[in-house]
Amino acid sequence: MQDDYDDFIPISALQHYLYCPRQCALIHVEQLWAESRHTAEGRVLHERTDRPRGERRRGVRTVTAMPLADASLGITGIADVVEFHGGASGEQAFPVEYKRGRPKAHRADEVQLCAQALCLETMLEQDVPQGALFYGETRRRTDVLFDSGLRQLTRETIAATRAMLQSGTTPTADYRARRCDACSLIDLCQPRLLRRSTSVGAWLARQLHDGIQNDHPCESN
């Protein structure tokens, strides 16, 4: 169990880590941030859910900006929306995370939502079997089942993210056009430049190594 709250990692870091470990380190280790059209649109989308409030409509109680934490996992964060659906056995929690774009090929958004569910299970002492991702571009919800595979991936991501953040090391750049060109931190990260620099550095290292080998060939017995 995590007893020191300073060691808790933000749930949002899990999404950043799966999207790009370097982006995660730039934000959470180096404390860098940059606004872009995408982040601005995301901020506007979250305006309704960033203010704590509760309401009940058609038998569903809705809580926005709900604080979350799980001491056993050492994670903390804020859920955009948690719906509580009434039933004969009591209210059932159903987390909903708001995203700017559309459903993605990777599972970063699902892991972020699953981590919220794990917190809710600990806090409310109830199973939370599913939730939903609402995407602003499609204006539709995508239901997410918190099955054993997603739960395992979430726990592994928590461990990997924590290890990287505690190391204080920022991974080297790995430029991928579809990922990097849409990132608000691209000007701070400079993945194209650093990738070229790394390639040149590796080439020079090889040349130096080959030169040393040629000057001092190994003797055979």
Image (spheres, helix red, strand yellow):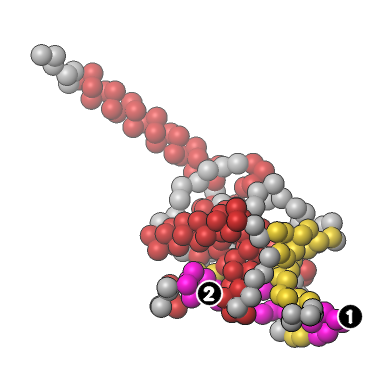
Residue 122 rendering spot, x and y as whole percentages: 57, 75
Q: Does the image show residue 194?
A: yes
Q: Residue at x 40, y 78 (%)?
A: 4
The amino acid sitting under disc 2 is: Asp
Residue 80 shows in the view: no
Q: Residue at x 60, y 53 (%)?
A: 149
| 160 versus 95 height, above or below | above
Label annotation for residue 70: 2
Classify 10 Å Cα crowding around label 1: few (below 14), some (14-19), many (20 and above).
few
Q: Is residue 212 above or below residue 6?
A: above
Relative depth, front residue between 14 and 170: 14
Q: In the rendered view, does 142 fall on the left or right side of 115?
A: right
Query: Where in the figure is residue 198, as x and y percent of width and height?
Result: 44, 39
Q: Nearer the viewer, residue 35 or 101?
A: 101
In the displayed image of the protein, which residue is found farthest to the top?
221
Residue range highlighted in magenta: 55-82
In this view, the residue in front, 188 or 23, is 23
Residue furthest to the front: 88
**What type is the residue that disc 1 sits on?**
Arg
Who's the residue at 82% across and 79% down the image?
60
Q: Residues within 10 Å of mark 2 (few under 14, many from 20)?
A: many
